[in-house]
Amino acid sequence: MTRPLVLLSALLLFYSPVHSGEIVKTPYEDPKVVFDFYFDHPEKINSALYWVRSYINPLGEAPYNFSPEFMSVKVVIHGTEIVTVAKHNYEKYKDAVDRMKYYDQLGVEFIVCGLAAKDYDYSTDDFQDFIKLAPSAITELVHWQQQGHGLITPNIMDKKLSIDEIR
């Protein structure tokens, strides 16, 4: 009698009805965000730009259909990635710069920290034409948060496993 009871208990313990996930349709309004780019390697800007895409694209699609001009998206640059927006480095970081130019046309603002620019001996003339220069990244980040922008700080890690390896 105890053996069937143990088997039944084990079956109930491991049995769970099959459920599916649910698509959430959060009622987003007035999309405003400031991205904090501060990376230890310039190449990480490529991955960080996917974070920008991952913010803009879903909001531009159904059911939201926000036009880019109705989004306020700021990117504050103040780490080693500052070299990617220096004109003399265009060929080296062409893919990233061209993506930033595309986002700039959609209304994304790219803002470089003036203190970091000084550290690299850059002036406004050294940057791509879509770059704005702020006195300080920290004060800029605080300002936009006070204006209601959510803060996103991309955490870019080195990918060690492919999706297929861990799926």
Image (spheres, rainbow, N blue to C red):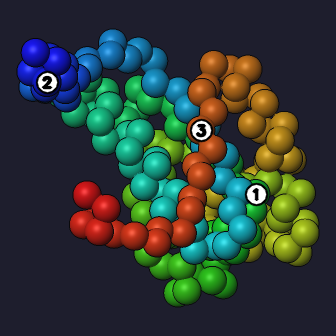
Which residue in the structure is indicated by mark 1?
78
Q: Nearer the viewer, residue 129 or 20?
A: 20
| Marks 2,3: beta carbons within 8 A | no
Graded by Cα atoms within 10 Å as few (under 14), some (14 to 19) or many (20 or more), the crowding at tag 3 reads: some
Graded by Cα atoms within 10 Å as few (under 14), some (14 to 19) or many (20 or more), the crowding at tag 1 reads: many
**Residue for point 31% across, 41% down:** 57
**Residue for point 77% across, 38% down:** 140
Q: Amino acid at mark 2?
A: Arg
Which residue in the structure is indicated by mark 3?
152
Q: Is residue 67 above or below residue 114?
A: above
Q: Is residue 167 left or right of residue 33?
A: left
Pinpoint residue 7: horizontal percent, then vertical percent.
Answer: 13, 26
Which residue in the structure is indicated by mark 2?
3
Graded by Cα atoms within 10 Å as few (under 14), some (14 to 19) or many (20 or more), the crowding at tag 2 reads: few
Pinpoint residue 156: horizontal percent, then vertical percent.
Answer: 57, 59
Pinpoint residue 149: horizontal percent, then vertical percent.
Answer: 61, 26
| Marks 1,2: beta carbons within 8 A | no
Please identify, in this view, whether the residue under mark 1 or under mark 2 is nearer the observer. Answer: 2
Q: Amino acid at mark 1?
A: His
Q: Nearer the viewer, residue 12 or 108?
A: 12
Distance in Å between CA atoms under marks 2 and 3? 55 Å
